[in-house]
Amino acid sequence: MSPRGATTTITALLSYTPSLHHSRNSNLLSISHHRRLPRKLHSIPSFSIPNVKTKRYNLASCKVSYALHFSAGTGMDSGALLQDMGATALVTVGAYGLVQVFDNLTKQRLIQQNSTSSEARYFAAFVPLLNCLRLVINGLSLIPPDEGLVKSVTREGNPKELLRGPLYYVLILILSAILFWRESPVGVISLAMMCGGDGFADIMGRRFGSVKLPHNKQKSVAGSMSMFLSGFVISTGMLYYYSVLGYFELDWGLTLERLAFVTLIATAIESLPTTNFVDDNISVPLSTMILSFMLFS
């Protein structure tokens, strides 16, 4: 067979169009003949590969397609991402501006840098008191409930949930500020366990909580471990901070031993099943408060 006839036969056999990533002069299409084909072929078998189409791509379309596939695969919404970035920028600028205002007022001695008055605790408790009133008003539906508030701090979207866990949370803040203020490690430890320990337990439990506790299938081993570690570390850091400022003095060897015991008990209480009357937002700080009062007062 002549070279021209062999080329025609091979072209008939390969009756599909290769993809773009194979060049026209690709080595995949160059065939070395070690045996001659017969001169007469009654029928030439042909085949084709379905779903193989030739497409033309350009760099811009590849970038757009990659961005769309990336956002779809990661669950990211470009609009929501831009909103989050904008909110972060505004909060950062606002916080920096507020700090600069108070720095200038302090330098001009229009306000004092600190206050040793015991009545300052009531001013500190005023902010969570306002939040408490907001939760009560929306929880009792005295006004049309704030949907943003309900969705952000409730699990089932029921406004009545505002009167349980979230309300207990701000009540503990008010109680700790008024009763213990900054002169006692009791309030510091109870708030650290509630805000830091219980908060990290919820986050890590949702993310890595595949292994559940044997006595409570709603809680996880990862959540309890996070509760103990974060509660202990945050409590230690806050106690060190207030002791450096001179509000109280601690024997750190004895303090760490007692703090580990308090953290262990708080972790065990947090792992208990939640009922309609018992919520870890109140059981954890109250038990921590009582135990810390017995050990640190």
Image (cartoon, rainbow, N blue to C red):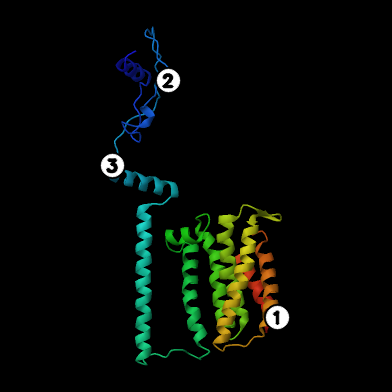
Q: Amino acid at mark 3?
A: Asn
Residue plotted at (52% across, 60% down): 160
Q: Are circles 2 and 3 on residues that touch, CB within 8 Å?
A: no
209 shown above or below 65: below
The residue that disc 2 covers is 34
Q: Amino acid at mark 2?
A: His
234 shown above or below 183: above
Q: Secondary structure at mark 2?
A: loop
Residue 47 horizontal/vertical position (percent): 40, 19
Q: Quadrant of the N terminus?
A: top left
Q: Quadrant of residue 55?
A: top left
Q: Amino acid at mark 1?
A: Leu
Point out the frontmost of discs 1 and 3: 3
Q: Are circles 1 and 3 on residues that touch, CB within 8 Å?
A: no
Residue plotted at (57% across, 78% down): 238
Residue plotted at (38% across, 66% down): 88
Crowd tier of the residue under label 1, counting other residues whose Cα lies within 10 Å: few below 14, some 14–19, many 20 or above: some
The residue that disc 1 covers is 295
Q: Secondary structure at mark 3?
A: loop
Q: Secondary structure at mark 1?
A: helix
Residue plotted at (38% across, 89% down): 106
Per the rendering, the mark at residue 58 is: 3
Q: Nearer the viewer, residue 236 or 106?
A: 236
125 shown above or below 38: below
First along the sequence among labels 2 and 3:
2
Crowd tier of the residue under label 2, counting other residues whose Cα lies within 10 Å: few below 14, some 14–19, many 20 or above: few
